[in-house]
Amino acid sequence: MKTLIIAEKPDMGRNIAAAIDPKAKNHRSYLEGEKYIITWAIGHLIELAEPDAYDEKYKKWNIADLPIIPDQFKLVPNPKTKDQLKVIAELAKRSDMLVNACDAGREGQHIFSLIQRHQKLKHPVKRLWISDLTPETIRKGFAELRDGAEFENLTKAARARSEADWLIGMNGSRAFTTKHNVLISVGRVQTPVLALIYDRQKQIEAFSSLKFYELEGHFLQQGDVSYKGMWQGERITDPAKAQALAAKVKGKPGRIASYEVKDTKEYPNKLYDLTLLQREANGRYAFSAKKTLDIAQSLYEKHKVISYPRTNSNYVTEQNIPEMHKALSALQGTAYDELVKGANRSLVHTGNKFICNPAKVEDHHAILPTNRKASGLNPDEQKLYDLIVRRFLSQFYPAAEYKVHTVLTEVEGETFKTTVKELLSLGWKVIYADMKKEKPKSKGKEKEEEENEEIEVSEPFFVNPNAGVSCADAVVKEKETQPPKHYTEGTLLKAMESAGKQIEDEELREAMKDSGLGTPATRAATIERLKRVGYIEMQGKKIMITQKGRTVVELIRGAGIELLTSPEMTGQWERRLNEISRGAASDNQFMENVKKFATMIVDKVRVQSRAAKTSFESETPARSGGSKGRGRGGRQEADAGELQSKAAGSRRSAGRAAAASGEGAGNASSASAAGEPGSARNRSLAVSSADAARRETAAASVSAAPGVIGKCPRSGCGGTIFMGRKGYGCSHYKEGCKFVIWKESYGRSLTDAQVKALIEKGKTAKLKLTLPGGSAAEARLVVKNTETGELAVEM
């Protein structure tokens, strides 16, 4: 008997095989050597069953049947990957031990646990828990395999998260959708995030601008020293008063009332966690949160040049310090060679609590470069890698040093303040000397105003406190109060991390991490989901709420379910899940509370008045921001706004717990799903109250992108194939045509020409494809079923 290793993805499985069993034979869906069989999960192979698995009546959406609260949640295989699940089941019969080598985190633990539960695997389990995929780390991880029982609490937390999201999303989405005749998606995390955006928008709209005036004095001392100072006093709103003050002091002598000089140091910024990396990549390069996560995952899995990116920590442990020194050495001879030469290795040690703080490292340490040299990176990968490497290198440099001069100058009884920050030594800032200067980080209103008065200089500054001065000029500057800024993805991530609290203090921010909205691994997917269901749209980097998004928040609050929109309360749920993972809280008690809350949502919605259909409509349709996300992060919440069927001809009920994954939906039962998330299975919902929603979303799918590809190949149909946002569907979807070809099929993003070949010839030319088991092959795509558009591979 052999040991069966289950990785999360094919690439990870192959990396493991190369490190511990390089002679293992490749069987496409697994590798086998003398001691080990290595296979993979391809993300979620198992899902929570949909409501109709518990009772046929749930195929129809009816508010009278809510709440749906299963006694025991049923598990079902994902139809798209059921072949791989069969492979794992067969391999397990030839094994006497399992190694869980899925991602070392809550969701990776969940993926393995679902397979184990569904297949009723009773084998002893060991856990591989590593933070990068270099061969050295993998071999070390296998030498130090941990007992699977150590992670039982993490498994409980993952299961509670999944089932809680199903309960809130499934019941909330069905209740609001059936009550208001419009597809409405609610969820444990996405709804409070939407509420954050809504509240910010309302603040901006309610803001009334106010003009005010600042007075800047220009001073001369002993003929050769000049400096500027800002008048100190109550904010001036009367321009005449400002001009009178200027006239009062201009040309008049004055004195130095106070002159203080103090030395100050600025230490390097903390190492990156995922959320901080996403925020900075958004600010500097306008990368979306999802794009940053995808690039980071590629740097980790494909290139193996950074450590595990889905981390919540800005610190490392004692064991990481030698690895940091190895990684520094590995950067010698690269584009960072000069910076490596200037590094002071003695600054990075176990006693430096700014870097090494094991108490603040839970599942994973901060993001670090590995000791593998980077090569073959695309431009975006290079940009993100560069951010990570520079932040890492800065830890090996001393603090930047300054002298801060604070001068209070009095003229005619009026006081002016001057703050000059004199640079003495660049220190770690030399790392960023060749990059464009970053915009200053927001530090609160008072802090920003204070910094506006601060001048940074690189030359020496000095005034004689005993010598007289004269006010050579006094300049009145007209200013205007500014409204709060629209969220960007970067600032929204910060708000999600602190459950919406405006936290500037780094220590408090650190303390709030356990009670943020979602996790580093799922926040990007939440933002993408809000785009897909039409609740938000992007205007450049600004996040704008749509009319539908506004109405949803107002309906939820109007129903008396403010708790569902409360970032702070939802953050406390996340904290409780973290406590469950540490064995400090009960998963059973948590689930009982969630069930009560789901019931309360339904009860409140049931008595709510129906909203007018026009209240969901904008003058301009929201632009789709949807894109294909990682399966794991996207399975955060049940989502009635993504009513996609999972396989050809499927007529199971909408709102499945994993529908928000964004992985695509195979060949759906309705062509309307090709364009608009939320429309695929509408005709399978025999509930009259959802008719209007079905018509609305089905029509949106085809009108979204009216490019005609060709005639529908379904016999007797007579429709035409249009390109939608996610696929190519038939114009006769209202008449019952189910033909659809998904853009993302077998690892490829299909072109118009390839789809045209499929509908006209029934096949494409040979393409490089990814087969269901995860292996690559050169083969043709063929139309297997002209009724549904289901595709198959022809070798």
Image (cartoon, grey):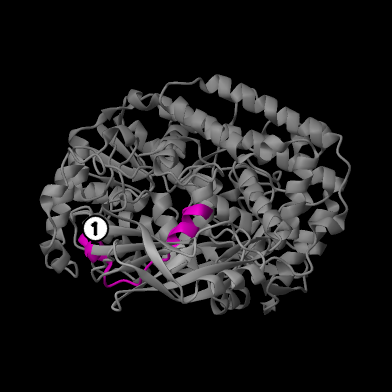
Along the line of sight, the residue nearer the viewer: 544 or 594: 544
Along the line of sight, the residue nearer the viewer: 701 or 184: 184
Q: Is residue 292 at all visible to an observer of this figure?
A: no
Image location (x, y in percent) of residue 215 = 53, 69
Q: Amino acid at mark 1?
A: Ala
- Badge 1 marks a residue whose secondary structure is strand
The residue under label 1 is 400
Report the magenta residues as a range: 424-451
Residue drawn at the location 26% of the way across and 29% of the way down: 146
Q: Quadrant of the C terminus?
A: bottom left
Q: Is residue 359 at all visible to an observer of this figure?
A: yes
User: Which quadrant of the figure has residue 715?
Assistant: bottom right
Left or right position of 770 against 551: left
Left or right position of 624 against 453: right
Vertical arrangement, residue 56 with respect to residue 782, above or below: above
Image location (x, y in percent) of residue 636 = 55, 43
